[in-house]
Image: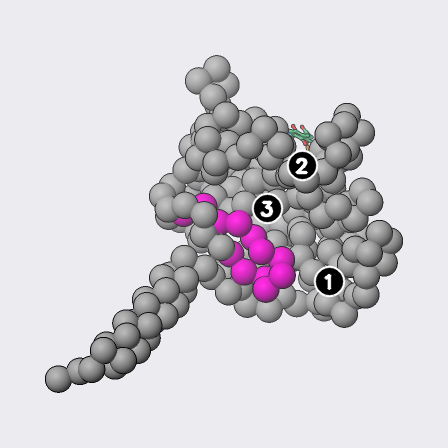
Amino acid sequence: MLGRKQINRLFVVSFVLITTLTMTAQNIKLPAPSTQGGMPMNKVMSSRHSVREYDTAREVDNATLGQILWMTAGINRPDAKPGHGGMVANRTNPTALNRQEIRVYVFGKDSVSEYVADGHMLRQVCAGDHRKLLAGTAQFSQDFVTDAPYIVLFVADLSGLPEDEATRQMALIDAGIACENLNLACVSEGLATVPRATMDKEAVSSLLGFTALQIPVLNNPVGYAR
Ligand SMILES: Cc1cc2nc3c(=O)[nH]c(=O)nc-3n(C[C@H](O)[C@H](O)[C@H](O)COP(=O)(O)O)c2cc1C
């Protein structure tokens, strides 16, 4: 017969175990990115172009996905000390005033996740295939995007920032810079992409529970060219 103390301990252990298992199911620790190699920059620039036809049979593995996400908005100076304004400048993507206000979401076939630079991982935010929301609206849609296994969404998160036009403009520019990192990263990794403003912003915001200060700006299908 178990005493009250033992039952309590059993309850705590089970809770921790269940929580850990759930976290593991929803979060994916990505393989460490390579800081060496890749395609020479001159070759990347001479090869970059938009692709709108994707190989539906070819998946992108986690190492490759992790590599391009790190190149897009990862941490490249883990030992950086706080600089301007007490902030640590440590990202592959520069941002105005080092605000680091760009969020990167990955829409896949089973779920939507946020790329968490600190830890280089994907944190699931909802289950299901929601790539169609990024294809467009009833008025205009580009259905080819769902042929790509992933679509990366760039969100300007103005939460907690000054509510003025300059801040908003800088955030849109910052999103463009991160997006171009991804365009070039895809070339380097042999992947195809196209930067896109087309998407159903209302539906995306509603799915992800965004406020008016979290603005979906651009998205990129990511896969192998057909
Ligand atoms: C901010 C921005 C928004 C874009 N939006 C779309 C889009 O919604 N759909 C699309 O097919 N291409 C989109 N593009 C891709 C452009 O059409 C493409 O870059 C341009 O035609 C030049 O072709 P290239 O990328 O092959 O050089 C966008 C590009 C940028 C920079």
Q: Nearest the camera: 179 or 123?
A: 123
Q: Nearest the camera: 89 or 160?
A: 160
How far apart are the two marked residues, 1 and 2, measured between alpha carbons? 23 Å
What amino acid does circle 1 point to? Asn
**Which residue appears at 41% of the width and 57% of the height?**
26
Could you say which quadrant of the image residue 116 lies in?
Answer: bottom right
As drawn, the residue found furthest toward the right would be 84
Residue bearing mark 1:
76
How far apart are the two marked residues, 3 and 2, measured between alpha carbons? 14 Å
**Which residue appears at 33% of the width and 72% of the height?**
12
Q: What secondary structure is found at the residue carrying circle 2?
A: loop
Note whether 132 is above or below 138 in the view shown: below
Q: Nearer the viewer, mark 3 or mark 2?
A: 2
Labels 3 and 2: the sequence-earlier one: 3
What amino acid does circle 2 point to? Leu
Q: Which mark is residue 158?
A: 2
Colouring rule applied to residues: one colour
The magenta-colored residue range is: 111-122
The main secondary structure of the magenta stretch is: strand
Q: Is residue 121 magenta?
A: yes
Q: Which mark is residue 104?
A: 3
Horizontal side, residue 185 vs residue 136: left or right = right
Crowd around label 1: few <14 · some 14–19 · many ≥20 (10 Å): some
Q: Nearest the camera: 200 or 151?
A: 200
**Which residue appears at 75% of the width and 34% of the height?**
162
Horizontal side, residue 8 vs residue 28: left or right = left
Q: Position of residue 143 (x, y in %)?
A: 45, 29
Note whether 120 is above or below 55 in the view shown: below
